[in-house]
Image (spheres, helix red, strand yellow):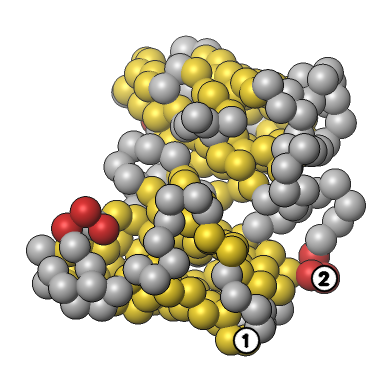
Amino acid sequence: GAVVSQHPSWVICKSGTSVKIECRSLDFQATTMFWYRQFPKQSLMLMATSNEGSKATYEQGVEKDKFLINHASLTLSTLTVTSAHPEDSSFYICSARGGDRVILRQETQYFGPGTRLLVL
Amino acid sequence: TQLLEQSPQFLSIQEGENLTVYCNSSSVFSSLQWYRQEPGEGPVLLVTVVTGGEVKKLKRLTFQFGDARKDSSLHITAAQTGDTGLYLCAGVGPSSGSARQLTFGSGTQLTVLP
């Protein structure tokens, strides 16, 4: 099946620094990528949707200047947490959807393994 | 407000018992998916149900999509310790909103004790 990777798998940083997380689709072209945030024992909350070559669409309540998303190619999207603070500590998960895998009425998003961010 | 509500939120049972997890919404979805997620990993797709009333079986797991495509259930027979994890339902839509976006349910944390 399709593979989506994330790097790094975990990161610890000091408050005030910026952290970049990469999401790559390894064997298909991802026309759309999604970024989610998940707190312990809770569900996934969609942060933003990005289409290759265009600006990301952010969900209500998500600061676009704090969570910078770049989807510059069909296989790579990055999420940069700028000036990270302890409350940004969370599990960040990306998913990718390829145009050639879309089936009418069936949507398949392939999820990455997640990135654990701890801000001290 | 979560569009998809799952119940129960937490469930702890003994190995060999049966269980059912419910996923309910007031919105209609074009399809609904169930995922299982283990700690520190991304969610893994178990099944997609598309047609109202559809029933799909995956070994000991039985998934049902409501006739009105607003709700779904996951039934596990003779649970095993390996079934432990966070179960998430996710609707595609709803039909009145973004047509191709996944909306995740609130999640059910299942613990199967030996």
The three-letter code of the residue at mark 2 reads: Asp
In the image, taking residue A100 as reference, residue A15 lies left or right, namely: left
Look at the image and tell me whether residue A19 can be seen: yes
Q: Residue at x 76, y 29 (%)?
A: B28
Q: Residue A92: horizontal and vertical position, in percent? A: 39, 60
Q: Which image quarter is the C terminus of chain B in? A: top left
Q: Which of label 1 and label 2 is nearer to you?
A: 1
Q: Residue at x 61, y 82 (%)?
A: A75
* Picture mark count: 2
The three-letter code of the residue at mark 1 reads: Ser
Mark 2 crowd level (few <14, some 14–19, many ≥20, 10 Å Cα): few
Between discs 1 and 2, the one toward the N terminus: 1
Mark 1 crowd level (few <14, some 14–19, many ≥20, 10 Å Cα): some
Q: Are marks 1 and 2 in contact (CB under 8 Å)?
A: no
Q: Residue A30: horizontal and vertical position, in percent? A: 68, 74
> Which chain's residue wears label 1?
A
Q: Residue at x 73, y 69 (%)?
A: A98
Instruction: Report, in whole angstroms, how far the alpha carbon at label 1 lies from the one at label 2.
Output: 16 Å
Is residue A17 placed above or below B42 in the rendered structure? Answer: below
Say yes or no: labels 1 and 2 on the same chain.
yes
Q: Residue A29: horizontal and vertical position, in percent? A: 70, 78
Residue denoted by label 2: A100
Q: Residue A117: horizontal and vertical position, in percent? A: 26, 63
The residue closer to the viewer here, A80 or B69, is: A80
The residue closer to the viewer here, A41 or A17, is: A17
Q: Residue at x 60, y 75 (%)?
A: A55
Mark 2, secondary structure of its residue:
helix
Is residue A3 placed above or below B10 in the rendered structure? Answer: below
Residue denoted by label 1: A73
